Image (tube, helix red, strand yellow):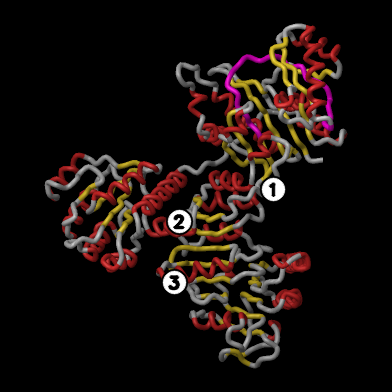
Amino acid sequence: MLDNFFKPSSVAVIGASREAGKVGYEVVKNLIDNGFSGRIYPINPKADEILGLKAYPNVNAVTEHIGLAVIVIPSQFIISAIEDCGKKGIDSVIIITAGFKESGSEGAKLEQELAHRTKELGIRVIGPNCLGVMDTYSKLNASFAAGMPPQGKIAFFSQSGALGTAILDWAIKENIGFSKFISMGNKMDVNEADLLTVLADDPETNVILGYIEGVKNGREFMKSAFEATKKKPVILFKSGSTAAGAKAASSHTGTLAGSENAFISAFKQCGILRAPTMEALFDYALVLAYQPLPKGNRLAILTNAGGPGIIAADACEKSSLTMANFQTETIELLRKSLPSTAALYNPVDVIGDAKADRYLSALKAIKNDKNTSALLVLLTPQAMTEPELTAQYIVDTFYGGDKPVVTSFMGGHSVEGGIKILDKNRIPNYPNPERAVSALEVASKYASWKDNPREIVEERIPVDREKVAKCLAKAEKQSEHTIAGSDAMEVLTEYGFTVPKIGLAETGHEAIELANQIGYPVVMKIASPDILHKSDIGGVRLGINSPAEVERAFEEIISSARRFMPSALILGVTINQMVPRGKEVIVGMAKDPDFGPMLMFGLGGIYVEVLKDVSFRIAPIDRREATAMINEIRSFPLLRGVRGEEPTDIQSIVTAIVRLSQLVTDFPEIIEMDINPLMVMPVGKGAIAVDCRISVEI
């Protein structure tokens, strides 16, 4: 689909320059110096030749086919150059030039015009405002970067060109091999979703890395990422994690939701591994690119010093890995080959005076242990230590095997030779045990995902969508965007929720009539689209048992609401059936600008804002994902029952979340929604949606 960006037969550089230091000069020089085997056509109407190559006034002056054009001319001339590319039949263009939407409103307008014209011409574009593209296998360096990394199995795409140059420089210094490097720039056309699709099927790439600040189309991105992670690891570093991208609006969910939670949920649901730092991005990449995936999460640790072994064991216990319990045969082999002072039971400590042969004996014993999924080898330089030979023994024992091994040769000059041997043979070495354990944990998580990617299996119930649409349309007719009370309960009822009997009273007399019909005791609440925290302003009364109490409560609720919020629109007071006590939880949704409906679950009532113990997912989801949401919150043990309490009907919560997922997917005009509280009874007795608030776009 994007082959000409990576394997073009020829490249034209529109804006090629004779002056060293100019971008147009550096791009041509990089193509020549890195050994690109195709034809290179410098395009410059004022030059006859550039860097020994014949120059052409425009692409149409070239008689041969051109596979890829790289444009480095000023932004105001680019649409004209694109017209020339269209006439020439060039379908792939990298626009390095800046001066588009990143520069202000005029630049944004120019970018819109450019996007429209390239789409009409059927031209795919990387950029504008980008560093360029590299492919180490075709020896293509269509960029103005200062160097090209060695050939390898890691592909990297970046939204930031400046960060890309730093990464490339670091990769060259550390001898980390790349297959491809793509600077996306403004992502006018080709974006991260396109690149995930292409790189997932690229035989030269084992691991996909990326730096992103946002995504162009959240749904498209998730689809591409899900398909890619079935085939190979995708590790992303996402910046801007502290900024809330979704507006905090009128609901609990809207207040708690934000772009960061949306990205966390999206990554989780489509198997993306998120790196917390740029350092971690490559820590994870190395083990996933060059070591087999672990079959399980049981870690063995081999060390020549007690302290580092303890540090590694602590890191293991804090992770999702577990310390391996060796087979009896393994322990006996270790006992026979190691001194009596050695520790045999994981971490294996071969003692500070260990030479390489002692490491070798332990390596062989652990390699064949069926209770071990992965091995971490630690080495500290001491008088008798043999780093180079120990490294070679690690290579000889594990190279080409099915069990991953990583190392932490700790120190500097003394272990440098051993680290070089490990690097040459693609055994990742980490400067400290914690980073090594973290990398193996990520490998274990990816192995688990790849074995069982979570396909969505939706559980749909029949719904009268026309009836629901009418309920939602009432908000538009009333120029409001909030639906509550009986209208909201009608929507929930259609989607299979159990709701209490409810009615809206505009007068004290109507309130008494409704209470008599519903049956005592009742709950009374202020009905106002402007009042979210009803109990805070005295807008809720519980356990009302007689007509006299109803009349008095009605007057008090209305009076209190007008006193505390005089500008609020007051519709009356809702009379609700008093439901049995249970565990209060909240299920809700806020519409994220990138990913669409984002579901939320947590403890309900007044606690959701205090504890903020909530979990999120992007809709639609199925029962398995809904169950994972519930298990994720810190207070989950309270739902299972503690200190003699009956366990809560968790399956009824799962059902509620799945039905909410269907509702907000069916009606994209819903922008926020809370069911708070959802009163959950003991096992087998279900759940009741006590209160609901729905906000729609109008």
Per the image, the residue denoted by label 1 is 593
Image coords of residue 431 (percent x, y): 35, 59
What residue type is disc 2 on? Answer: Ala
Q: Is residue 439 visible?
A: yes
As drawn, 552 above or below 41:
above
Instruction: Identify which residue is drawn at 67% across, 24% down.
Output: 496
Per the image, the residue denoted by label 3 is 172
Per the image, the residue denoted by label 2 is 280
Q: Specify which label sits upstream in the sequence, 3 or 1.
A: 3
Q: Give the residues drawn in magenta, as a range.
A: 567-588
Q: Specify which label sits upstream in the sequence, 2 or 1.
A: 2
As drawn, 125 above or below 543:
below
Instruction: Identify which residue is drawn at 50% across, 17% down.
Output: 646
- How far apart marks 2 and 1 lie (CA) works out to 28 Å
Seen in the image, is 234 located left or right of residue 501?
A: left
- How far apart marks 3 and 1 lie (CA) works out to 38 Å
What residue type is disc 1 on? Answer: Pro
